[in-house]
Image (tube, rainbow, N blue to C red):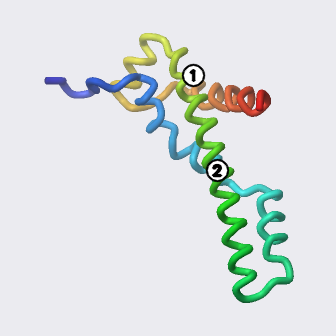
Amino acid sequence: MSGPGQVPNVTDERLCWPAVREDLRKKAHTVGLFGWITALGAVGGRSGTAARTAAGMAGDMRRDEASGRMADYAFAVDDAAGTLGADERRHLRATGEVPAWFLADVERRVAEIRAAK
């Protein structure tokens, strides 16, 4: 049996995700100017059923994009977790917190992933 602060049978990479998921979800679901233009353009001068259908399609596009961004973040979190030192891993397991540098490293890795696409 494990004592307090110990998390058995879970990799450090898996523990990093809950520590940063909410911050990354907010970033992934942020609708930028292009997203709003797409949504408004889809509805355009339509009314009634056509407007609802266009708005629904625009919403689906935004959700698909956010899902893709979250996948990029998941890969980056996994990669960044591999660089944690022994003390940082102990701190993660004890507190559920990643080091201060971790999110910036994840963002850097996401930029590399997206540039390679």
Residue drawn at the location 82% of the way across and 57% of the way down: 34
Residue 3 in the image: state x and y as whole percent. 18, 24
Q: Which one is nearer the viewer's eye here, 113 or 19?
A: 113
Q: Which one is nearer the viewer's eye here, 35 or 22?
A: 35
Does residue 55 lie above or below 112 as drawn? Answer: below
Secondary structure found at label 2? helix
Does residue 67 lie above or below 36 as drawn? Answer: above
Does residue 25 lie above or below 49 as drawn? Answer: above
Q: Which one is nearer the viewer's eye here, 106 or 4?
A: 106
Which kind of residue does numbered mark 2 sit on? Ala
Which kind of residue does numbered mark 1 sit on? Asp
**How much space separates mark 2 and mark 1, taking CA atoms?**
20 Å
Residue 59 in the image: state x and y as whole percent. 67, 65
Q: Which residue is mark 1?
A: 79
Residue drawn at the location 51% of the way across and 22% of the way down: 81
Secondary structure found at label 1? helix
Residue drawn at the location 68% of the way across and 26% of the way down: 109
